[in-house]
Amino acid sequence: MSVDRNILYLSSYSNKRNGLLEGGKFLQSEFSKSVTGICAYFGFYEVCNPKPGKRVYVSAASGAIGQLVGQFAKLMGCYVVGSAGSEEKVHLLKNKFGFDEAFNYKEEHDLAKALERYFPDGIDIYFENVGGKMLDAVLVNMRLRGRIAVCGMVSQYNLNQREGVKNLMCLIQKRIRMEGFVVYDYYDEYYSKFLQTLLTYVKEGKITYVRHCSRP
């Protein structure tokens, strides 16, 4: 199925009012035209290869991709923890999107210990959106043969000198599979499956979505 790539950007301009928009036809249009939806879908279902009961951690979890990944994981029957940068976002993750737990990473002095607190038995799946110190903390908390889907590294985008990662040896010791992906590589192959699955969830009320739209 060939898809005009221009539709990926329509959702950014599909509503010119400020505020949070939820539900209805706009929500369905937002999902079907936005790259974030298929990015979350492919990254979680295909790269992470989840199974019920797995322990899932999502960084930048209140973002457009993270909030969907967390809900996909809950629908799969996983234990899900997300991190965000404010108490308001933490509240949203737990009370709107149904994450089992969430925490404000800005209030944690030791990210590795914070993750150990929420994952005493380790992390099976990490959906990576942050990079840097967060990735280092995750690596030491991963379980044997865990999976990491690298969607983005927002902490590194605006740095003049990007941070190194110190705990890469964990990839070997724990037999971790860590895979980056670019959603355009898989758009044609997975778009129809993504659209059918996601819009069914939306119509059945199993997925909720909050998007802040500002004037272009």
Image (tube, grey):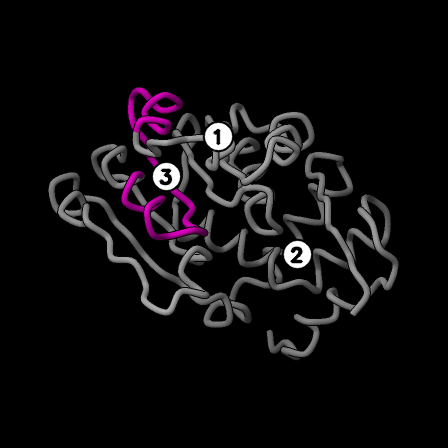
How far is mark 2 from mark 1, CA to CA? 23 Å
Residue mark closest to the camera, 2 vs 1 = 1
Q: Position of residue 158 (x, y in %)?
A: 45, 65
Q: What amino acid is at disc 1?
A: Val
Q: Please tell me how crowded label 1 is: few (under 14), some (14-19), or many (20+) other residues with Cα within 10 Å.
A: many
Relative to 167, residue 106 above or below = above
Q: Kindly identify the residue that appears in the image at 54 percent across and 39 percent down.
A: 84
How far is mark 3 from mark 1, CA to CA? 10 Å
**The magenta stretch spans residue 128:** yes
Left or right of residue 108: residue 124? left
Pick whichever, 152 or 154, lies toward us: 154
Q: Residue 146: which disc?
A: none
Please tell me whether mark 2 sits on a helix, a strand or a loop: helix
Q: What amino acid is at disc 3?
A: Ile
* Magenta range: 113-137
Which quarter of the rendered picture does the N terminus lie within?
bottom right
Mark 2 sits on what residue? 195
- The reply to whether callout 3 and callout 2 are in contact (CB within 8 Å) is no
Q: Please tell me how crowded label 3 is: few (under 14), some (14-19), or many (20+) other residues with Cα within 10 Å.
A: many
How far is mark 3 from mark 2, CA to CA? 24 Å
Q: Position of residue 130 (x, y in %)?
A: 43, 51
Please tell me whether mark 1 sits on a helix, a strand or a loop: strand
Mark 3 sits on what residue? 125
Q: Kindly identify the residue that appears in the image at 29 percent across and 27 percent down.
A: 122
Image quadrant assignment for residue 179: bottom left
Q: Position of residue 121 (x, y in %)?
A: 29, 21
Mark 1 sits on what residue? 80
- The reply to whether callout 2 and callout 1 are in contact (CB within 8 Å) is no
